[in-house]
Amino acid sequence: MEPFNRVLSSLDLPEITEDLRELYARGLIVIPSIPEFDPIPDLDTVGNVSYVGPLTMLNDLGAADGGHDIERNGIFFYRTMFDATRAEEFLDAFGDLGSEIMIATGDGSVARSLRDSSRFGRASIKVMFDMSVVARTAKCAVTIGGHGSCLSCIQASLPSVIVLDPSPERELNARWMERMGLGYVLRPPTTHPSVIPWAQIRTLAEGLSSDSETRSNVTKWRARLNRDGAAIAVDRIANFANL
């Protein structure tokens, strides 16, 4: 804590006495989510907390109309395919989708490597996709359960198959997705890299996208998430700082 206290002292601010988290309780806490997805125990005792909804690409672009009443056949993969050596197994499971396969690697070198391998047929491979486009073309997503990807998929009306690695944060996100009826969670054996059972993923994905209760849940929570966003966050911060 000493480096923090030196800075605080130089600014004539109270020093930390026990825990760095004291800093959070001194000012406004803006949470880019909703209470149902990121609940805070004993919220009344925490202080000045403001939920503003997810801060994602879909906030600034406006909520894309990703309703399941339109024909969407694609599947969006986010950070679940890194190894071209398993392309054959992947295409055995998903190859019939052709260009409707969207693989987002989150990493430029990985995206180039997968494209250069020429083993993925007509699949579209990029670092990231415009989620408003994904919302119009994909029926479900396969992700690793990150906070932003979970909320973005809900906003895009995409139920998710979540392939977990040993991450407490992602485990928590995945549990909320399950509880809210927005996805299935798969926990493959821990290996490096993870060996994802693509045939099983396809079965789960098809089950999700055709389940009427899941579609209803996605519609409900999408509407809830899209009420707020970046503009609300800016307004709360400006008011707190008297700007």
Image (tube, rainbow, N blue to C red):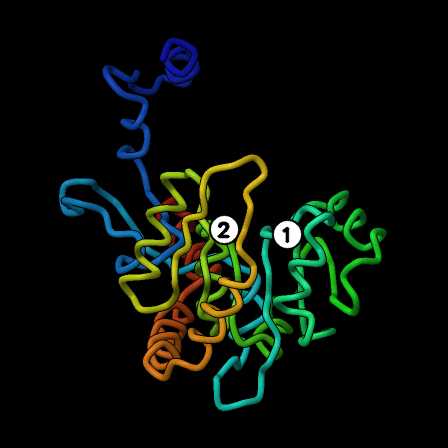
Q: Estimate the x, y position of residue 208 in percent, counting from the top left.
A: 42, 73
- Where residue 135 sits, quadrant-wise, is bottom right
Mark positioned earlier in the residue sequence (2 or 1): 1
Residue 81 is tagged as 1
* Pick the front one: 194 or 35: 194
Q: Estimate the x, y position of residue 47 in percent, counting from the top left.
A: 21, 42
What residue lies at 73% left-to-right and 57% top-to-bottom?
126
Instruction: Name the residue that disc number 2 marks.
Output: 144
What residue lies at 38% left-to-right and 42% top-to-bottom?
169
- Where residue 77 sits, quadrant-wise, is bottom right
Name above or below for residue 207 compared with residue 88.
below
Q: Mark 2 and mark 1: span between their CA atoms? A: 10 Å
Q: Estimate the x, y position of residue 51 in percent, counting from the top left.
A: 32, 55
Name above or below for residue 111 compared with residue 8.
below
What residue lies at 17% left-to-right and 45% top-to-bottom?
41
* Pick the front one: 156 or 170: 170
Q: Which image quadrant: the N terminus?
A: top left
Give amino acid for label 1: Met
What residue lies at 74% left-to-right and 67% top-to-bottom?
123
Label 2: how many residues lie within 10 Å, few (<14), some (14-19) or many (20+)?
Answer: many
* Pick the front one: 39 or 180: 180
Q: Nearer the viewer, mark 2 or mark 1?
A: 1
The reply to whether discs 2 and 1 touch (Cβ–Cβ < 8 Å) is no
Give the secondary structure at mark 2.
loop
The number of numbered badges drawn on the structure is: 2
